[in-house]
Image (cartoon, coloured by chain):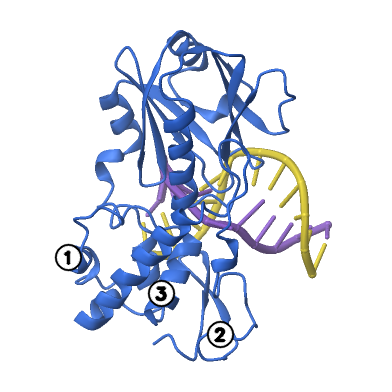
Chain colours: A blue, B yellow, C purple
Amino acid sequence: MTEMPEVEILVRGLREHVVGRTIQTAEVLLPSAVRFPAVPEFIAQLAGCMVTSAERRAKYILLGLSDELLLGLHMMLWGTLRLAPAVEARPPHTLITWRLDRDEELRLIDQLGYARAALGTPEAVSQGLGLHLLGPEALDPGFDVAALARQIGRRRGVLKSLLLNQRVLAGLGNRDADESLWLAGLDPRRSAATLTEAELTRLHAGIREMLTEGIAQGGTQRDLLGRKGRARHRRHIFERTGLPCPRCGTAIAITRLGGRRTHYCPGCQQ
DNA sequence: CGCTACCTGGGT
DNA sequence: ACCCAGGTAGCG
C-alpha cells in the first residue's frame, strides 16, 4: 500500500513533526531490516543525532542527520512509519524504533518485513541504495512531455514495465502506473516506441494527475500520526477486475506484465 | 531481459 | 494447502 503519494505524505509528516528533534536511541527488532552498516554501528551512530531534514527521492525517504549522516528508508510493499508516545504498545511487526525527545518514538512498521533502513554519509547512502541511478522525478517541475519522450519514447520495451523502472522514471508504482495508463487511454502492453506525440502528452498528464491527486488526498493509508488518507476511492481500474470501466462500461481485464498484476480496460485503452 | 529471494497474513 | 501481495536487489 505504499506508493509514491503515500511516501510523500510520510515525508511531509516527518518535516512537520520530526525534523529538529533528537534521536536518543535506536532499537532494531528485525536485524535484516538494516541494510548497512552492521546493526551495532547503526545503533551507535544514530544515538544523539538531530534530524535536520526530510526529503523524498523516488520512493526512498531520506532523513538528514547532524554529523553529516543520512538515514535512508524504504517502505517496500506495505511498510509505514508512525510517531507515537513511547509508552504506547508497539504494533506487531515493528521492525525498528527511534526514541525521540518528549517521550515519543518513531516506528518503522511492516507486516511483510521487507522495509529497509540504511545509514551512512550522504555519498555512502547514495551509492549503497543506487540513488544516483534513479531517473527523473515524475513530479519535478522540469519533467515535461519532452522529458518523458526522452526517457521512454525510443525504447522498445513494454510500456508499463518501463513506467515501473525507477531508472527510467522515478516515482510510479504498480497501482499508479495502471491508473495513469487508464487516464491516458493507453494499452499497458504497447511498445513504448510506438507512442505518438499526442499519446505521450496524454500519458504525461495522466501520470501527473494520478500522483498529484494522490498526494492532495493524503494517500490511501494512514499518515505519521495515524490519520486516514482519503485517496482510496480514486481507483478507476486497480483491483476492479470484471467491473465496468467508468469511462466506457467494458469489463476491466487483468493480465501480468513483467511479473506484475496489470489492470486495464480492453474497450478504451489502445 | 526474466527469474528468484525476501517474509507474513489474508483470501480462496 | 495453496496462492498472492502496490518493491527492489541480485543472479544468470
Is the C-beta separation of discs 1 and 3 under 8 Å? Answer: no
- Chain under numbered label 1: A
Disc 2 from disc 1: Cα separation? 31 Å
Chain hosting mark 2:
A
Image position of B11 (left or right of A113): right
Q: Secondary structure at mark 2?
A: loop
User: Which tag, 3 or 2, sits closer to the chain's start?
Assistant: 3
Identify the image quadrant of residue A235.
Answer: bottom right
Residue located 18% across and 56% down the image:
A142
Q: Are marks 2 and 1 on the same chain?
A: yes
**Is residue A244 shown above or below A112?**
below
For label 1, the SS is helix
Residue A18 in percent (x, y) is at 47, 25
Quarter residue A90 falls in: top right
Q: Residue at x 45, y 33 (%)?
A: A73
Give the numbered dot on residue A234: none
Name the residue rendered at 28%, 25% in the picture: A122
Classify mark 2: residues with Cα within 10 Å, few (<14), some (14-19) or many (20+): many
Horizontally, residue A74 falls left or right of residue A110, namely left
How far across and how far down the image is residue A80, in percent?
A: 57, 39
Q: Is residue A76 above or below residue A174?
A: above
Amino acid, disc 3: Leu
Alpha carbon distance from label 3 to label 2: 13 Å
Residue A74 in view of the camera: yes
In the rendered structure, find residue A181 and report the number of the disc placed on it.
3
**Between residues A170 and A31, which one lies in front from this camera angle?**
A170
Q: Amino acid at mark 2?
A: Cys
Q: Chain of mark 3?
A: A
Which residue matches tag 1? A150
- Give the residue number, with chain letter if any, for mark 2: A245
Task: Determine whether, in the image, residue A219 is placed left or right of residue A186.
Answer: right
Q: How far apart, in angstroms, are the residues tagged by discs 1 and 3?
A: 18 Å
